[in-house]
Amino acid sequence: MKHRFDHALDSHGLPPMKRVVPTTLQVNVGRLCDLACHHCHVEAGPKRTEIMEEPTARRVLELLERNPALHTLDLTGGAPELNPHFRSLVREARELGRQVIDRCNLTVLFQPGQEDTAEFLAAHAVKVVASLPCYTRENVDAQRGKAVFARSIEALQHLNTLGYGRPGSGLALDLVYNPLGASLPPAQAELEATYKAELRELFGIEFDALATITNMPIKRFAHTLEREGRSEAYMALLVNHFNAATVDALMCRTLLSVAWDGSLHDCDFNQMLELPLGSGPRTLWDVADLGELAGAPIATDAHCFGCTAGSGSSCGGALA
């Protein structure tokens, strides 16, 4: 069965998806990662070779400088810290006065050559958004690999010593939860309270906020669903929980996604499915004024139900 997201919008009296002027440039700097998590929609891992090169990174910074409406550079991967141009992107974006987000898997901080990465992030007031899909060892290691939980806890404790997650420090530390399997996340506020209580009591860890993110039925997680014979059941779960109240807040309205090769997409998930922008430029070099993208249609497909199910899901967490 083919699920049509545009039909769902129409049936709820909602117009087709269109973007406004982008305020966030989310840049996937490569698919190289020290982990190979089961839910990873990027299919990142230690053997991936896709990596953003210096001319593309330079063009990212040029667009930031030319477009003052872009207030945030959101760096993702893979493990973005493994890109050789990661630090120059951070430094120069901060010099331009932009907020920088590092979507960190935590364990990368223990990789060779990354010994001072946490200190670098703190020195440049980079917001850290860290993956921690549960506060228990069993669930984290089952999803992300053996001993990942222990290293993640150690990394969070180190970030805390630098001021991350501490009131008044100016160093923001958010955590990201996603379900272990084919289910929707629980209520974000309630789960955040549980995370804070458990991590504080067991490990002395403090953080600012928790983002709950739905597993998207694409790439590695989609392959898992197919092997288990649960693809259609999971899609039905997402479709049946479509929440019209989430649509206005969908991240694709204000976010522009950039792939490691400079191609442009409406969101990170579309990027992984190689869906180009709904209309307009195809690469970083085809556009200078991002204000021209305002009013442009957004490319949608069945996976978009993952962002509108239940309380909704985005890179910033629940939407409603």
Image (tube, rainbow, N blue to C red):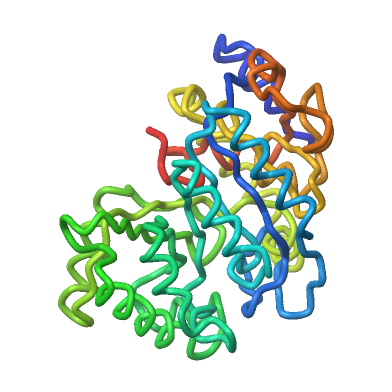
185 relative position to 58: left or right: left
Q: Residue at x 44, y 45 (%)?
A: 99
| Residue 262 higher or lower than 3, as above or below | below
| Residue 185 higher or lower than 293, as above or below | below
161 relative position to 167: left or right: right
168 relative position to 222: left or right: left
Quadrant of image for the C terminus = top left
Residue 260 percent across, percent down from the top left:
76, 54
- In the rendered picture of this protein, how many numbered marks are placed on residues? 0
Q: Residue at x 66, y 46 (%)?
A: 268
Residue in the foreground of this view, choosing between 22 and 210 = 22
The image quadrant that residue 163 belongs to is bottom left
Q: Residue at x 21, y 59 (%)?
A: 169
The image quadrant that residue 201 belongs to is bottom left
Residue in the foreground of this view, choosing between 219 and 127 = 127
| Residue 78 higher or lower than 155, as above or below | above
Residue in the foreground of this view, choosing between 277 and 292 = 292
Quadrant of image for the N terminus = top right
Residue in the foreground of this view, choosing between 192 and 27 = 27
Residue 96 percent across, percent down from the top left:
50, 42
The image quadrant that residue 283 belongs to is top right
Residue 141 percent across, percent down from the top left:
49, 82
Q: Residue at x 82, y 52 (%)?
A: 261
Residue 226 percent across, percent down from the top left:
76, 61
